[in-house]
Amino acid sequence: MDIEQFRRAGYQAIDRICDYYISLRDRPVSSQVEPGYLRKALPASAPTVGEDFQLIADDYQKYILPGLTHWQHPSFFAYFPTACTFEGILGELYASSTPNPGFNWSASPACTELEAVVMDWTAQILGLDKSFYNTTEIGGGVIQTTASDSALIATVAARSRYIREHPHVPVEKLVLYTTTQTHSLGKKAGLVLGLRVRALQVTAEDDYALRGETLKVALKEDKGAGLHPFILIATVGTTSSGAVDRLGEIAIVDLASNHSPSAVKNYPSLWLHVDAAWAGLALACPEYREACQLSTINNYADSFCANFHKWGLINFDASCLWVRHRSHLTDALDVTPEFLRSKHGDAGTVIDYRNWHLGLGRRFRSLKFWFVLRARGVKGFQKYITDCIALNVKFAQSIRESDQFSLVAKPFLALTVFRLAPKSLPHLTTPEMNALNRAFYARLAARSDIAITQTELNGVFCVRMAIGAEQTVEGDIDKALALIREEGRVALGEWRGMQG
């Protein structure tokens, strides 16, 4: 492909992307293909002679698009949103046009310097304390792939710090704390690093949030057993229910980052990592900062993560990790062979981001941040967040007022967790109610005009409604409510028929 061929193909690609988004509302939300469809459609091996690019572009439309679930669809309410904006697409296009591995400042100075700038911009937007800014040259922020990577890296740094401060403690005695509602990233970090993981129990009575007393008891038990808890992964906005761990209570127990003498004596060096992958973006709106416990995050968190590729208008991947002390990352991850050394790196006058994550090379992800942040501005971010929350308020109120359904957890931001719970059947047992709701959800999952996911909260099967697609409007919520009510009626009728 020469330059002019690329120009023509590029024009066509942009036109087709625009046509895709124009027609998105009319497409099924979920892919309708069967497993193995693509292997059957494609040749068994790559072509020996290169093919005409027009044929390749047409085959994308023919074979690939039908196999995609459309996460930006206005009726996509599953998992959490995945952001996509035209500004972000263009940022990715420009970044991919000048590929470089970005492993140190010298590899491409603009890549490193823009990342340092936009990480400070995003920290300011979210209201993070200045100790997390790159300009302090003590703390700082770095773009990671996902919140799982951010948690893994925070765990590596916390382990390194703990072992450095307690060289006599064997690794097998270390304990990573999560809760029974923490994302699987906590368990996976333990699996990758060969660490003990203890999931602390949370209850419905506490809105599925970790309480300080629960942490205090666990620390006492593990210390008495000769174990060494070294990190707690707390959450603001859990996946299943949107729960917010009680960081204020946790901070009273864990004051290690505040260097309280009594705390250091009792529970030394317990790292507090706050995973706010989804809900953290609501910090852009000052009115939600108290609910998301920003003050405690700023005072006590050792590290903090928010995914702009979820609810932050920036295309995947765009996970932001901030640390209060960057040296804990570099002490754990700095490996600098001679061929990676540079004058500025040796002098310590620049950031070498390869020492802030697990890999060596890294993509030029800061460019799409720069494009989107400039194009939308703080006000644009705030409006998007508040619009999503307003739609969820409408949905949750309809569930609350319904004789068919009930809330399982307190609605939080743009997430509602509910179940089919007819007031005409108040005496159903939990197993019976779960069976009814599994049948109800199976009907929802079989539809192609809505995407929604299930979860389980302490033995209660329920359904999650997460709003976040930028094209979603009030009419889409009305449509979702109508089909949810209809499937609820059908599922209930079938269940009653089975009961005789």
Image (cartoon, rainbow, N blue to C red):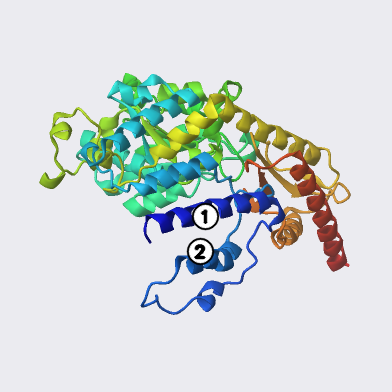
Considering every residue shown, the one lying at the far front of the view is 4
Say left or right for 24 vs 156: right
Q: Is residue 228 visible?
A: no
SS label for mark 1: helix
Say left or right for 462 vs 479: left
Rendered view: 137 above or below 272: above
SS label for mark 2: helix
- Residue 110 placement (x, y as % from top left): 30, 35
Q: Which residue is mark 2?
A: 57
Nearer to me, 212 or 93? 93
Mark 2 or 1, nearer chain start? 1
Q: Is residue 71 visible?
A: yes
Say left or right for 229 vs 413: left
Residue at 56% x, 74% y is: 37
Q: Which residue is mark 1?
A: 13
Residue at 54% x, 44% y is: 84
**Mark 2: few/some/many CA within 10 Å (<14, 14-19, 20+):** some
